[in-house]
Amino acid sequence: MLKIGICGYGTVGQSFVEHLRVHDDKIQSSVSEEFEIALIADRSIDKKEYNKDIAVTKDVMEMTSDSNINIIVELIGGIDIPYKVITSAIKNKKHVITANKALIAEHGDEIFKLAKEHNVYFGFEASVAGAIPIIQTLTNSMSNENILSITGIINGTCNYILDQMSSHGLEFNDALDEAKELGYAEADPTFDINGMDAAHKISILASLVYKIKSPLKNTYIEGIENITTMDIEYAKELGYSIKHVGITNKKNDSIQCRVHPVLIHKDNILSQVLGVMNALLITGDKFGTSMLYGNGAGGDATASAVVTNLVEAINFSSGKDLRNKNIFKSSGENSFNISKNEDIASPFYLRIYAHDISGVMAEITNVLANEDISIEAVTQHEPIDLDSLIPIVMITNSVNGISISNAIKKIESLAHVEGKVHAIRVLKTDER
Ligand code: HSE
């Protein structure tokens, strides 16, 4: 009988235990050996409801050296303690499963090596895009393909907030409160809205696909804090939705790895991904583009991916499933340049506030023309009252980040323009 230890008994830990209870027969029939949950470690376990047949402890390190425990499921969150738990467990020859994207993005290279060295299973399916089997797909089903790009909506909280603002006219903070209540947001939701959570996820995918060391430090990260209902409405008028995406791709010897808001044309399938849903478009040189779509956040969705790893870990421990080895094969051995944001080209959405004075539009278009930027679409809105500024909204042709930054500086210094110009990249058709 294999013994499972769970570290961390929050939203995902509780959903995981419930999933095992409800689907016990089904799961036991797909594993090579019987198993049971033997121990739960959680600092505030006395404040939570749990099955009294299961032993509990407040000391999360205890189970890493407990010789009765064979598989540890780490669901604590954060980096420092999970790092100690996981590395210690692996050194003690325990199989490990985690949902911890921050840890994998920061220390994945080292942990993969350690797991390989100690010949233990290490599963992290739940770290990217909740219930969507993206790690499995990339490291097994597509492991013999040349992946050209991955573009995805990979933060459920951001997608939920943007969708609530767009479809129901909710204010940003109200939509965020809802996402917290529904269990989508991180313990510290700053990581969701400032793009860090998505950056962890896209870095993990880039390192798996391109066999590079984690590119997190060189990933361009922008969140959704500056997206306003007004931008969402103007984008709609032009035929676009605003989404937060993660993109990684390889062109020659350069890799792009970035997360930021984008305008997505309504004809692009990603614009139809609503609520907390996640979706990833994966493009390969032979298979074309495939899309994976599903629940990207929430206890049940994440726990479902953890259960998938548990079945693999049990079968791995009895030598019946060697798929996990693919993940570690040649991991981190390639090195490519990671493109800087200013060198990446795309069309841009610009929102400019100007005084309602004749000639102001000509001044702006002159600045753009001098930077060799042309305008693909433009709308000018009426001022709300006689004294107020007019919002001018435009979409440019595809230009690199440095040209747009230069143009923005010049536009902001025009006498009849007020405040900051707001720029958002527009997803190019070859990025879908
Ligand atoms: N906070 C994350 C999200 C949870 O909203 O996507 C899943 O990783």
Image (spheres, grey):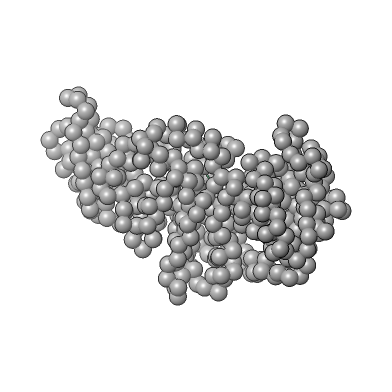
Location of residue 92 in the rendering, given as x and y in whole percent from the top left corner: 82, 56
Left/right of residue 335 with respect to residue 226 in the rendered view: right
Q: Nearer the viewer, residue 399 or 16?
A: 16
Residue 77 appears in the figure = no
Q: Nearer the viewer, residue 98 or 193?
A: 98
Residue 132 lies in quadrant:
bottom right
Q: Nearer the viewer, residue 190 or 414?
A: 190
- For image coordinates 60% across by 45% down, the residue present is 299
Left/right of residue 150 with respect to residue 360 in the rendered view: right
Q: Nearer the viewer, residue 222 or 74?
A: 74
Left/right of residue 184 with respect to residue 39 in the rendered view: left
- For image coordinates 36% across by 55% down, the residue present is 427
**Furthest residue to the right?**
67
**Furthest residue to the left?**
358
Location of residue 224 in the rendering, given as x and y in whole percent from the top left corner: 43, 41
Location of residue 407 in the rendering, given as x and y in whole percent from the top left corner: 29, 46
Residue 262 appears in the figure = yes
Location of residue 166 in the rendering, given as x and y in whole percent from the top left corner: 35, 40
> Quick check: 29 above or below 375?
below
Left/right of residue 73 with respect to residue 409 in the rendered view: right
Q: Quadrant of the N terminus?
A: bottom right
Q: Quadrant of the C terminus?
A: bottom left
> Quick check: 378 above or below 400?
above
- For image coordinates 36% across by 40% down, the residue present is 167
- For image coordinates 37% across by 57% down, the residue present is 269
